[in-house]
Amino acid sequence: MRAASLESWGLILNSFTELETQELELVKKFMKHDRVWAFGPLLPVQSSPIGKNERVGLTIGSFVPAHEVIKWLDSHHGDLSIVYVAFGSQITMNRRQMEAVASALEESGALFIWVVRALMKGTDVDEEDQSMIPYGFGDRVERRGLVIKGWAPQDEILRHRAVGSYLVDELLDYHAS
């Protein structure tokens, strides 16, 4: 679990007790208190005035609209050929970590989608601690990679026939604990 979660007064998880009774008990034991609640499942909104699975740009820079991501996925005809990489909105990677992920994606030769946390408006930018894509990375991998800054339609991406593997923040949580 993330250090901030361990130091918090309580923890709310996107799940429900009947599904993960044993896991919730383990989390309570690990946290050394009973202030752990399952509240959910919380699902994406299926309808909104701006369209299904689209978002208003609330970040510096831009995101790629859902229909463009699906179009990109559809253009790669091989089933299970794309790697999806996303570390969520709560993980901030430093420059060295970003360079390591970029290098691994570049050297692998794999097709990929990499979702990078965007800077929020009003954020004080500290270059060493903010998620920054290495200079020139996009140009070097433009034919086989899609880098999305900010929000991405994760549910649609993971359900797409072209996505064969993924690296997401839940895997990091597992290995960090």
Image (cartoon, rainbow, N blue to C red):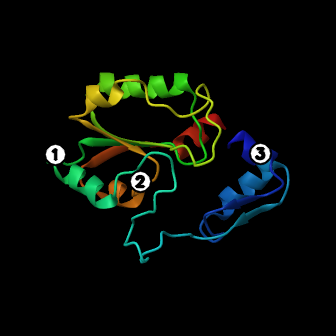
Q: CA distance from mark 1 to mark 3?
A: 42 Å
Which residue is tagged 1?
A: 78
Q: Tag 1, which secondary structure?
A: loop
Is 154 displayed left or right of 29 in the figure? left
Are the residues flagged by discs 1 and 2 in contact, CB closer than 8 Å? no
Amino acid type, label 1: Gly
Rendering coords of residue 82 (x, y %): 27, 42
**Camera-nearest residue between 119 and 79:** 119
Residue that carries the numbered disc 2 in the rendered image: 152
6 lies above or below 67: above
Discs 1, 3 touching: Cβ within 8 Å: no
Residue 121 percent coordinates (x, y) = 58, 49
Q: CA distance from mark 1 to mark 2?
A: 21 Å
Q: Nearer the viewer, residue 128 or 101?
A: 128
> Quadrant of the rendered structure where residue 37 is?
bottom right
Residue drawn at the location 83% of the way across and 60% of the way down: 34
Q: Which residue is mark 3?
A: 6
Q: Amino acid at mark 2?
A: Ala
Q: Secondary structure at mark 3?
A: helix
Closer to the chain start, of discs 1 and 2, is 1
The answer to which image quadrant residue 11 occupies is: bottom right
Three-letter amino acid code of the residue under disc 3: Leu
Q: Quadrant of residue 48?
A: bottom left
Q: Residue at the spot x=65%, y=38% of the render?
A: 124
| Residue furthest front as drawn | 122
Going from N to C along the chain, the mark reached first, 1 or 3, is: 3
Dot 3 or dot 2: first in sequence order is: 3
Q: Residues within 10 Å of mark 2 (few under 14, many from 20)?
A: many
Q: State which mark lies toward you, 3 or 2.
A: 2
Quadrant of image for the N terminus: top right
Mark 1 Cα shell of 10 Å, populated few (<14), some (14-19), many (≥20): few
